[in-house]
Structures are given as structure tokens and as C-alpha cells.
Image (cartoon, grey):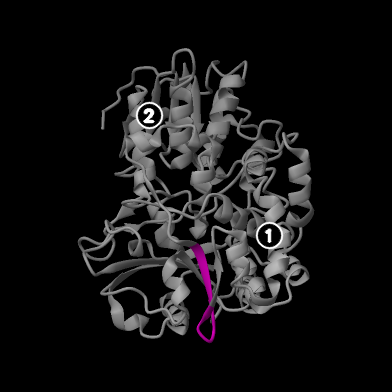
Amino acid sequence: MSDAGARPYDAVVVGSGPNGLAAAVTLARRAPAGLSVLLMEAEDSIGGGARSAELTLPGFVHDVCSAVHPLAVASPFFRSLPLAGHGLSWIHPPAPLAHPMDGGTAAVLERSVQATGATLGPDARAYGRLMAPLVGTTDDLIHDLLGPLKLPRHPLALARFGALAMLPAASLARVLFRGERARALFAGIAAHAIQPLERPLTGAFGLLLGLLGHAYGWPVPRGGSGRIADALASYFRALGGEIVTRRPVRSLDDLPPAPLVLFDVTPRQLLAIAGGCFPPRYRRQLAGYRYGAGAFKVDWALDGPIPWAAPACARAGTVHLGGTLEEIAAAERAVGRGEHPERPFVLLAQQSLFDNTRAPQGKHTVWAYCHVPNGSGFDMTDRIERQIERFAPGFRERILARQARGPAEMERHNANYVGGDIGGGVQDVRQLFTRPVLRAVPYSTPAEGLYLCSSSTPPGGGVHGMCGFSAAQAALRSRHGLGALCGPRGS
């Protein structure tokens, strides 16, 4: 990495997660001539939530945080970039998702709506009636949903989606379906909301991620999620951008001169770095920003594939472990009360089944996590493994090594994971559309030239780069975007 001195830049981006990289790329390729942009990262390596490493044994490549990427392949911004030419390739498992049930059966999210319905017993027709009309509008929905709150470009598609999306996932599943498998499949997808399923808007997560599975799949990057960050960084450098690592920013005095600064951080870090530039009301609003449940994650090196009782699970890149709708809802409700469920809902990825770069021949990697109260110090390893063993008897006999990370370890790895919150803050009705605070331009701050571009801005969590892209676009549109930044480093 280059060692940037104190020379001035047109813009500086702090933080190299997917959103920071997206903001840097957007600024660097501004027409007709890109801006000079410096990207600063506090850690040894770039990527934020999109990193890979040998966490267990040599030769076993694990995804440190994000693993499966329907939003990345659907992202209008990522799709506009030549990332394939910079080393990024996608692997699509035969089925995006499997949801095993007790007794050796499974509901399966297939690329085809009809094929998915065939795994749902009495709800095949109901699933088709729900999803088939929406799948054809997925592109339109993505453009309206992956951005700040605004007048929709496709109001009819959004209205059709929104009529169901605002409902609680648990209620929606019970109204739409009468069978156990369809209800469980929908509940597991909706649980990506990281909230109790009785809360409004959780239905949106089940609908959108299900639609993405049909329209785009739930793929994994060949070689690990770090390849996403590597490709973005490669393209950014090709545009003339500079990246420095091991350069933490604790105050504005740590920045080189630049009239634009974009922060891929959460409100807590923004306050610590630049709070002195903000009026009291804005500081109070940032201080009141709410963080959500944490993640407890385990990675395993195995001496063979997971021995699933339901053979269909071996076709899926992602497997949801939680049993019925009632069990999943109870687990997420317990987390919402600050408790640790005995039977947690577990999100599992088995990338090495489809990507032979992840493990030595005949061996495998497994990635999984469950939700826990924010800041929890409770070790969920045994409970997660018991859920896997429930649907794959003999799993523990294949473990060669494991690494577990609770919320504190997650936050040490990435300061944006406050209390283990991997979503950058609660994504509920109160905070999804107004994150981090209610402003006409949510990415701007009262300090001239200073912007927030993290998942704590719309559209929220996920590896899609749209927060960074939209923040950079807002900065470029601002008439005052090239004014003086508060403090001596912007002069």
C-alpha cells in the first residue's frame, strides 16, 4: 500500500468495507475526470465485513463475516462495475437455500418458483401465487428499495410489494401458508431482519431475500468474500485511487487536507471522531441511534461434508436451522428480550461444497452464526452445534478444528459491529428509513463537506455498496461539497 503523506486530496474515505470502497470508486470515476481519492483503513487489511482468512487450520479459507451474497449480485452499483475483470467470479450452488425439518425432509428455495413450491407440500400453489407476480418486478423493486426514501420510480411494483412487506413475518407466514414447511422456510428467510418476527416490516426481509433467490440466486464468491473487496480495490486503484492500511482515524486531525470526507463508520465512531463539529441536537440524535442484536459466529474445518439427514441440503449453499415457524419465532423473541435461546435459529453456509478453493481436497469449511443479545458474553458454540447435529447426526464427529467469535470479538475485528451488531443498527420501522437521523439527505451532516456512507445510512445492512454509492452521489451533488471542512485538516 502507498504511504500517503499530508498532500491534499479532493476526497478522503475512512473505512474500507464494501460501502467505503463503493464511495471511493464513485468519487474516483466522477466524469469527466475523477477526483483524487485516498481510502484510509485502520486494520491490516481492507474489506470490513467482506474478508476471508485461514481461521482454523492452514489451507481452510473462511469468510470472516459475510458469506452469501444475493444483494451483491443484485446491486445496481456493483452490476455497473467491471469487477469480473478484476478477479471477482460468482459460484451459484444448485439451490440457494435449504431449510431442513425434523424427520429428514426439507423445504428448498430453488431458482424456480415452481420447483420451490414442489418442496412445500400443500402450499405449492399459495407460494406460486405469492412469488410469481413479484419475481418479474425484482429489478424495479431493487432500484426503489436500495436507496434513500424517495418517490419511487416504479410505484405499482412497490405498492404490490409494500402491501405485504410492512406486515410482521410471523403473521404473514400464517396468513399465506397452512403447511409447516412453507411457514418455516419464510420465517427463516425473514429472520435475516435480526428482530423478533412479530415486529412490523420483518415480512419485507422474507419477501425480498426470497425474490432475490429466484431472480439472482444466493451465490458465493470464488475464493472467499474477501474477493469482493479485492476486486473493488483493484478497480479503485485502476482509477488512480490510493489505499493506506494501519491508519486509524481517531479525530479529524488524523486526516490529510481534503474538502470532502466520507466515513464508513457507525454513529458512535462518527461522534468520537467529529462530534465537536456538530451542533448539540445532532450529537444527541447520533447518541440516540439504536444498535440491534449481536451475532455469535463459529467456523469449522471438517474432514468431510456435513452428513445431512435431508439429502436436499447438500445441494444448497445456505442452510437455515431452526425447525418450525414457532421455534424460529420463539428463538428470535428470546433474543429480543435479552435472553439466549436453548435452540437458536442458525444461519449456516457450506461454501466448500461448491468452491474447491476453500479447503484441501476431501475436507470442508462450514460457517454459521446465531443471534444473541447485543454485547452478550455467552458462549453459544454448544447450542449451535446441537442444532446442526439435530439435522445432521454425526456432524461433530467430522470436526477437525473450530473458531468461535462472540459479539466482543466481532467488534474487535470490525469497530462497526457495535456489540456484535452486523447490520449497522436496528433496521425497523423507526430506523430503516431515517438512519442515522431524519434528514432530507441522510448521508450529510451539519459539518460542511463531511458525510456518512456506512450501513448506518439507507438502505442499511448487506454487501451491496449502495450506501457508499448514494453517499458519494449526495456529496457530489451538494453545492457546498467542496467547501471547507470543519477543523484545521480541511483547510
Residue 92 position in % (x across, y down): 43, 55
Camera sees residue 378? no
Mark 2 / mark 1, whichever is N-terminal: 1
Specify whether 211 is left or right of 149. left
Residue 35 position in % (x across, y down): 44, 18
Q: Residue furthest top?
A: 32
Is residue 97 inside the magenta stretch? Answer: yes
Q: Amino acid at mark 1?
A: Thr
In this rendered view, identify the residue nearer to me: 435 or 27. 27
Residue 27 position in % (x across, y down): 47, 24
In this rendered view, identify the residue nearer to me: 395 or 210. 210
Q: Identify the image quadrant of residue 211.
A: bottom right
Is residue 99 inside the magenta stretch? Answer: yes
Residue numbers of the magenta segment: 96-105
The residue tagged 1 is: 202
Magenta stretch, overall SS: strand
